[in-house]
Image (cartoon, helix red, strand yellow):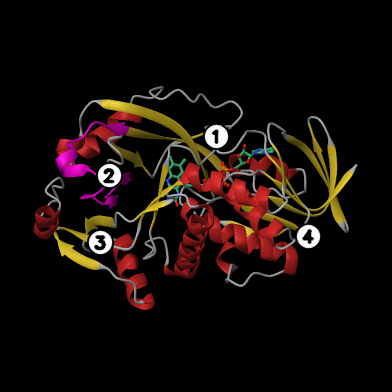
């Protein structure tokens, strides 16, 4: 049986980044993935993810977001790849929406650039947006869009260059924790590791159950749609990524990048799903297209052209929608990165680094107390 200093189970957004930081510290690292990341079966596909720093979900995330930003730039520099486009992000909604208040508080506390605009000013700056008079827009010019699949490819190449071993198409079927290590069983092999990172996205609950941890993780079917849009109004050189917090829903989206059309998703809702049984056909529910189309018709009418494509993806919710990044309560050499609740990608670089520190030093430089496993 081959032995490793660290075994990463699930080499997707979080796992691939962690694999790089582990291997870079000289750890003999094995990355195991049932797919061939980046791929279409988990939570990271569909080309792009929004990154923003003035954080409506809570200002406690800001240091992690700022560290992630630094690490994404470092990765882009090391690999020579374009991983980020600075489109800016516009968050819009009623002036007293809690999300927008938190965006402003985050910006104030951390001195982040943020412009608060009334509806008329938003319409003047971006004629493709129609806001009701009582809405405001909070524009963060330094934020933008990450090419998520390209980011994973970049971490993959760096991890391999630092000596990590990656086994794709190899699904972990069992884990046995021991006092000073763990045995990992896959469909084809058995490995032993001194330490483990469990970062299997929508599949985490099952793996953690085999280690005696029953966590409230809910994999959920989500969709995104690309619509043909007026490029004069919505192309990425003149239109920001966006997030709308509405009375009963939340939508986010992207300007048209390289003529792909405007991409939009609904952040709330979705259908709880077993990731192994999930039907990944876009259009299975009429709401797959109807929700995003009616959002565009209301707020960005010239972006509500014919549907170009649609994709099905997975969120994994925790009850409070905060992440779980912690050591296993009984086996401190086993680290968990789970429950990213539909807003984790932007942090993947910093989560990977922090998880690698939990493994090698038992603690991370950045404060992870918000993400403690013991809160459940
Ligand atoms: C439609 C959509 C839009 C989103 N938009 C944003 C956004 O704009 N900004 C943002 O920050 N976040 C966004 N997110 C959230 C973000 O993409 C996720 O939080 C993040 O990708 C989760 O990463 P992960 O590593 O947990 O999962 P994944 O990236 O899915 O990685 C898990 C990996 O584990 C592997 N695996 C699973 N089971 C096993 C097993 N038994 N053995 C071996 N390998 C296994 C899988 O193959 C996979 O590669 C969005 C998510 C979706 C679905």
Q: Is residue 233 magenta?
A: yes
Q: Is residue 201 above or below residue 19?
A: above
Disc 1 or 3, which lies upstream in sequence?
1
Image: magenta residue range? 226-254
Nearest to viewer (mark 1 / mark 3): 1
Disc 4 or 1, which lies upstream in sequence?
1
How far apart, in angstroms, are the residues tagged by discs 4 and 1? 29 Å
Q: Residues within 10 Å of mark 3 (few under 14, many from 20)?
A: many
Element at badge 2? loop
Tell me the residue at 69%/54% (across/down): 162
Disc 4 or 2, which lies upstream in sequence?
2
Q: Farthest residue toward the right?
A: 1
Element at badge 4? loop
Q: Is residue 76 magenta?
A: no
How far apart, in angstroms, are the residues tagged by discs 2 and 3? 14 Å
Q: Position of residue 173 (x, y in %)?
A: 76, 35
Q: Which residue is mark 1?
A: 39
Judged left or right of residue 3, residue 136 is left
Q: Farthest residue toward the front?
A: 80
Q: Which residue is mark 2?
A: 255
Q: Which residue is mark 4?
A: 333
How far apart, in angstroms, are the residues tagged by discs 2 and 1? 23 Å
Q: Is residue 101 above or below residue 126?
A: below
Residue 258 image-quadrant placement? top left
Disc 2 or 1, which lies upstream in sequence?
1
Picture disc at residue 139: 3
Tell me the residue at 72%/34% (across/down): 171
Disc 3 or 4, which lies upstream in sequence?
3
Can residue 344 be spotted in the picture? no
Judged left or right of residue 45, residue 302 is left
Q: Is residue 95 above or below residue 365?
A: above
């Amino acid at each position: 049986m081959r032995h490793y200093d660290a075994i990463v189970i699930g080499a997707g957004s979080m796992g691939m980044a962690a694999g790089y930081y582990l291997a870079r510290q000289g750890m003999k690292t094995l990355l195991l993935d049932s797919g061939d990341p980046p791929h279409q079966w988990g939570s990271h596909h569909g080309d792009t993810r929004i990154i923003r720093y003035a954080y409506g979900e809570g200002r406690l995330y800001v240091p992690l977001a700022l560290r992630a930003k630094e690490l994404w730039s470092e990765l882009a520099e090391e690999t020579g790849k374009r991983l980020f486009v600075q489109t800016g992000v516009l968050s819009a909604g009623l002036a007293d929406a809690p999300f927008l208040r938190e965006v402003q508080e985050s910006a104030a506390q951390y001195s982040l650039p943020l412009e608060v605009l009334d509806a008329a000013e938003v319409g003047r700056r971006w004629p493709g947006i129609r806001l009701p008079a009582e809405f405001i827009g909070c524009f963060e010019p330094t934020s933008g869009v990450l090419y998520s699949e390209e980011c994973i490819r970049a971490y993959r190449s760096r991890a391999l260059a630092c000596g990590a071993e990656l086994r794709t198409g190899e699904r972990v079927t069992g884990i046995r924790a021991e006092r000073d290590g763990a045995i990992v069983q896959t469909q084809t092999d058995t490995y032993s590791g001194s330490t483990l990172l469990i970062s299997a996205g929508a599949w985490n609950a099952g793996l953690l159950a085999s280690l005696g941890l029953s966590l409230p993780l809910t994999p959920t079917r989500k969709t995104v749609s690309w619509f043909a849009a007026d490029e004069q109004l919505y192309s990425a050189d003149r239109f920001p990524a966006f997030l709308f917090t509405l009375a009963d829903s939340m939508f986010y989206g992207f300007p048209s990048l390289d003529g792909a059309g405007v991409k939009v998703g609904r952040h709330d809702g979705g259908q709880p799903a077993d990731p192994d049984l999930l039907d990944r056909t876009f259009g299975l529910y009429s709401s797959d297209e109807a929700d995003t189309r009616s959002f565009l018709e209301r707020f960005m009418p010239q972006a509500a052209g014919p549907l170009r494509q649609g994709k099905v993806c997975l969120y994994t919710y925790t009850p409070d929608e905060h992440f779980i990044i912690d050591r296993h309560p009984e086996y401190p050499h086993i680290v968990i990165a789970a429950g990213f609740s539909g807003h984790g990608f932007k942090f993947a670089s910093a989560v990977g680094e922090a998880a690698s520190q939990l493994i090698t030093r038992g603690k991370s430089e950045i404060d992870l107390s918000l993400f403690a496993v013991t809160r459940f």
